[in-house]
Image (spheres, coloured by chain):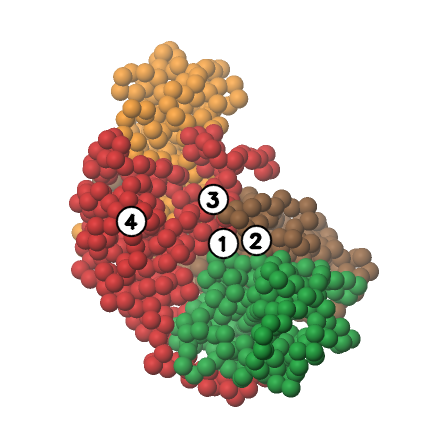
Chain colours: A red, B brown, C orange, D green
Amino acid sequence: MYILSENFFLFLEILTSQDVAMNKVVKNAEEAIQGISDGMTLMLGGFGLCGIPENSINALVKSKVKNLTCISNNAGVDDFGIGLMLQGKQVKKMISSYVGENAEFERQLLSGELEVELLPQGSLAERCRAAGAGIPAFFTPAGFGTEVAEGKESREFNGKQYIMEKAFESDYAIVKAWKGDTDGNLIFKATARNFNPLMAMAGKITIAEVEELVEPGELDPNFIHTPSIFVNRIFKGENYEKRIEQRTIR
Amino acid sequence: MYILSENFFLFLEILTSQDVAMNKVVKNAEEAIQGISDGMTLMLGGFGLCGIPENSINALVKSKVKNLTCISNNAGVDDFGIGLMLQGKQVKKMISSYVGENAEFERQLLSGELEVELLPQGSLAERCRAAGAGIPAFFTPAGFGTEVAEGKESREFNGKQYIMEKAFESDYAIVKAWKGDTDGNLIFKATARNFNPLMAMAGKITIAEVEELVEPGELDPNFIHTPSIFVNRIFKGENYEKRIEQRTIR
Amino acid sequence: MLDKQGIAKRIAKELRDGYYVNLGIGIPTLVANYVPDEIDVTLQSENGLLGMGPFPTEDEIDADLINAGKQTVTTLPGSVFFDSATGFAMIRSGRVDLTVLGAMEVNERGDIANWKIPGKMVKGMGGAMDLVASAQNIIVAMQHTNRAGESKLLQNLSLPVTGLGCVKKIVTNLCVLDVTERGFELKELAPGVTVEDVKNATAGKLIVEGDIPTISV
Amino acid sequence: MLDKQGIAKRIAKELRDGYYVNLGIGIPTLVANYVPDEIDVTLQSENGLLGMGPFPTEDEIDADLINAGKQTVTTLPGSVFFDSATGFAMIRSGRVDLTVLGAMEVNERGDIANWKIPGKMVKGMGGAMDLVASAQNIIVAMQHTNRAGESKLLQNLSLPVTGLGCVKKIVTNLCVLDVTERGFELKELAPGVTVEDVKNATAGKLIVEGDIPTISV
């Protein structure tokens, strides 16, 4: 058994030094979305309007980037979330599991301006996770015998029928976290977690916007949802509206 | 939009009442392993000797149950962990990624008493996770072109070669957690997490032993590693030895 | 006839102590109101919550805490949050003991259609296809006929299928049916409903054997 | 000739600021001691730790905190723990920027053997097959010849393969080589080592073009 030399202490010093930064921190959403260009495929975190990357979406709207393919469980509402990108006719195709809350979406779909690919929600989640795990394809029972299975391989395992789904390919994943550190570690809050950590794993480049940005060491290493290695850019978002779709009370 | 009736308050009362228990809590390891019988397949959490279910292993040794197939990344050392089950000749087959720390293992393997199936560590982890996720099979690049690929389907995706690996099937999964609540929610500590949450998802019946057993509500719902639904039996373990394999210090 | 609450009450009788239950939107959600006193069930919301509590008070509302129907909810002691892949891992691996959902149509073989009407705007299947493909124990809660008065219990589906051979039990405003290899087996009648009423409202093969008890809720 | 520390020092020059690095057992681990002052790298341990710190003091030892070599280690600010499926997700999805590992043999096509010697007790591949099948940037650190004095750089492997076509660079006690479609390209010589020495110790096809600089460490 070998013993690391005293140089390791020097190494430790370097790692903890404030002089050296990973340079993942960007100033704001505008800087974070640099490089996103026409025709790209984006993953956008959130379930309904819960846990969506509000700042980044607003910056995308301002950027007027277009012909985007968006992988997101939902498509926002008419005047919030991805709905704003639809208003700007920036989206060529949506890959989602449920898109029922958006009149502009319906109009563009019926007029043929917008293409939509609907997938079972669990398959959508797992195809993100697969991309982040280097798993190119997997089998799921969801959708066997339905329209979703068309053009997909099906196979029996242990007497049950499954279809093969492939990992998503995307250029950028954009997620919203509750807290993050400057290394890129992320923590999500309650059910705003949803697709965010899965998409964070999956992007070629992953952008995270957070409500609170802290220094490395401030988050408990045992309770981090997305390890820093998956995050390329991080910034503190501003003015979160956090709109509620179904405000149900007792 | 409907509003739940006032009966939901009654429902709330029931859920929080101490009178009604999920009955997942068992007294000790002996009670926890009831039902494990000759010829079964067990998953055992841990990496090396780190995070292994010490109490349950000791109870299995005492039970003298035999002809077991054990899925575990390692096989313990001669006088600790799964090594104790090997001493008792209780194991028919080991499915592992690394078994180099155990002389009795070597003796039984060379004499033909013990069968071993070696798998890449990542495939072992993913086959546990797949079982817990209802994914019967997936593709991984690990092992393509090697002995590991023999008898397995291989396929190209995006110009790269992969082999198909299947979800594990096991009768019981036995894991060790740091803290758990009586509903079965689990938290692991540091790198003692390793295979434990993956196997916890995967067992037909999952047994968890914990260092601290607390009441529901004492663990922060945002920071639980294994949701209760995956755990069938839970108990507070005693006298953890936590043996260290490579005691390296500065 | 049962009203929506009646259907929910009857389904609640299928709950067992310790069950993890996934309730769909609509009538299924009402089942939560009728959990028997002596048992304890845990509600799963596939977006990322196990142990769903009641709607919040005005003060408790948290935009970051919603259920699969996108409604604001609360937690209970023992609740746990997770990502959506884990939510569906629970479902696909068969850890959810009972799934209750609505349907547009069910056929004699237990195939279900509940996600798409050709010619109408498609909203999407959400988690329905994962649920019906995975759950061992699915109860459909629905009206026996549609708004046009046509049977929703058919020999063959007219709408696009959501999942094959998955429905085991149906509770409608008229009756309780088991779906078996023989067809729709009539098990219980709603108060005031006759076998003849059910026959008239059922387009698929209906099996009626012996005396049919009245639903007690 | 380079000793083990020398090999580690040379490999450390391949590190870049911000790299996530996985270091195998043996010589590769020593690379951590020679990270240049001006850059910041993060060590990944596939069992479940990103941001591995140095060995603990006697007081800091924690049996629940070990690396992939089963050694007690520590954390650093920014460290994070995860399960082993996530550990290999990072590896398979190409998020690890540099992987350094030992080898028993490498052939001209970059195939590597490092897990099994027929006739000897097989210990297992651990994470090696996942690492070599996934990493984009693999450096092999090893002695140029085995204990019997035979070359470990071969035309064809004699031992069971761990992964195909994955090794891009090799640093041995004698030299630095790139593995290209033409074979082993000699890039740098260890101090005191001649091209002839490398030729004699290399069984596979060796490409020597132009002046070969001496390794500076």
CA separation, marks 2 and 4?
32 Å
Q: Chain of mark 1?
A: A
State the residue position of label 3.
Answer: A166
Residue D110 location, quadrant: bottom right
Q: Three-letter amino acid code at disc 3? A: Lys
Return the disc, 4 or 1, that comes first in the chain's sequence.
Answer: 4
- Furthest residue to the right? B111
Residue at the image point whose x is 32% and y is 74% from the top: A215
Q: Nearer the viewer, mark 3 or mark 4?
A: 4
Q: Position of residue D107 (x, y in %)?
A: 67, 63
Depth check: give the residue in front, A80 or B160.
B160
Depth check: give the residue in front, D159 or B205.
D159
Depth check: give the residue in front, B61 or A192.
A192
Q: Chain of mark 3?
A: A
CA separation, marks 2 and 1?
8 Å
Residue D4 location, quadrant: bottom right
State the residue position of label 2.
Answer: B141
- Furthest residue to the bottom? A6
Q: Chain of mark 2?
A: B
Label number found at residue A38:
4
State the residue position of label 1.
Answer: A134
CA separation, marks 2 and 3?
15 Å
Q: Secondary structure at mark 2?
A: loop
Residue at the image point whose x is 33% and y is 71% from the top: A23
Q: Nearer the viewer, mark 4 or mark 1?
A: 4
Q: Secondary structure at mark 1?
A: loop
- Please determine if labels 3 and 1 lie on a single subunit: yes
Q: Three-letter amino acid code at disc 2? A: Pro
The reply to whether the C-beta atoms of the residues labelled 2 and 1 are less than 8 Å apart is yes
CA separation, marks 4 and 1?
26 Å
The N terminus of chain D, quarter of image: bottom right
